[in-house]
Image (spheres, grey):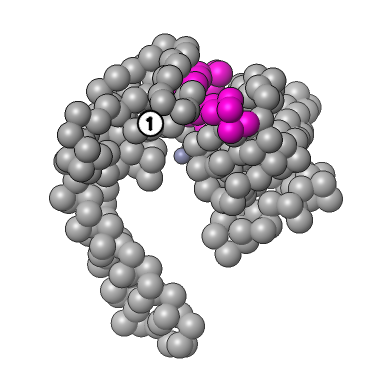
Amino acid sequence: MVNTHFHWDHWHGNEVYPAAYPGAEIITNQLTREAMVRKGLKRIQDHVRQVPAEVTRLRAELAAATTTEQRAKLQADLRLAESYLAEVRALKPALPTMAFERTMKLYRRDREIHLLYLGRAHTEGDVFVYLPRERTVITGDAVIGWTPYMGDGYPEDWVATIDRLAELDFDTIIMGHGNPAGREWLRTFRGYIHDMVEAVREGVATGASLDEVKQRVPPRLAPAYEKAFATYEHYRPWRTGLLANIERTYAMVS
Ligand SMILES: [Zn+2]
């Protein structure tokens, strides 16, 4: 069992694996394990405190909703929030039992598994799982099928990390979110981050404010990337994701 990074949707529920497979190890790298201890555990407590308010808000909005669409959407959101609250309250966080620094190689009967740290990207400690024989790499959220979440990320380091990943010999990418893809998608994804960071840097260099950068950059990126990144529009709208990415990058650059 491998944790690729410290985000809730990638390690909550760890505890079921050793319960189902006694003696099972949970592996990650040192940076991610530290991030789980420092930030992940605290976020669980934050969720336990914050989600009840979210449930109350959704209930009030549902009571006030006027259209069928609004009601259906709010009902679905409410169900999700309520079941998440029950889950997060019952959570018994299980930290990884093994941690590596840069590389760990596992040799199993008919599978060779390389665990790699290639630099900062989506978080400070993203783990890549490389299966050389299957010519496949598993990326966690350092590469995903839609606009990346950068709230805990390092946009300025991300491209170099992807370039180190690209040096490996593989055909298939299994991503943290989205359908499996080939190297073509990696080029598009890298291009998006590269061009976005460069455009924000340029804005900062000319003394532009965050609001000005948020107006200037989207029209520059849209022709090359909007179509490719809008595949999951219902899930993460391209524009919302891009503006959040610009904000994070602007804060990191300036
Ligand atoms: Zn993530």
Residue nearest the viewer, comparing 233 with 248? 233
Q: Quadrant of the C terminus?
A: top right
Position of residue 172 measured from the top left corner of the image (x, y, whole percent): 64, 38
Of all residues shown, which one is farthest toward the front?
109
- Looking at the image, residue 69 sits to the left or right of residue 39; the answer is right
Disc 1 Cβ-to-ligand 1 distance below 8 Å = no
Quadrant in the rendering for residue 155: top right
Residue at the disc numbered 1 = 2
Position of residue 20 measured from the top left corner of the image (x, y, whole percent): 20, 43
Position of residue 151 measured from the top left corner of the image (x, y, whole percent): 49, 37
Whether residue 19 is visible here, answered yes or no, is yes
Q: Indicate yes or no whether the magenta region holds residue 122.
A: yes
Residue 118 drawn above or below residue 220: above
Look at label 1 and name its amino acid.
Answer: Val
Residue in the image at 45% along x and 16% along y: 105
Please give the range of residues in magenta. 114-135
Residue nearest the viewer, comparing 188 with 58? 188
Residue 60 drawn above or below residue 207: below
Residue in the image at 58% along x and 28% along y: 133
Position of residue 210 measured from the top left corner of the image (x, y, whole percent): 65, 38
Q: Indicate yes or no whether the magenta region holds residue 227.
A: no
Residue 85 drawn above or below residue 174: below
Q: Secondary structure at mark 1?
A: loop
Residue in the image at 34% along x and 25% along y: 27
Residue 49 drawn above or below residue 128: below
Residue in the image at 55% along x and 18% along y: 119
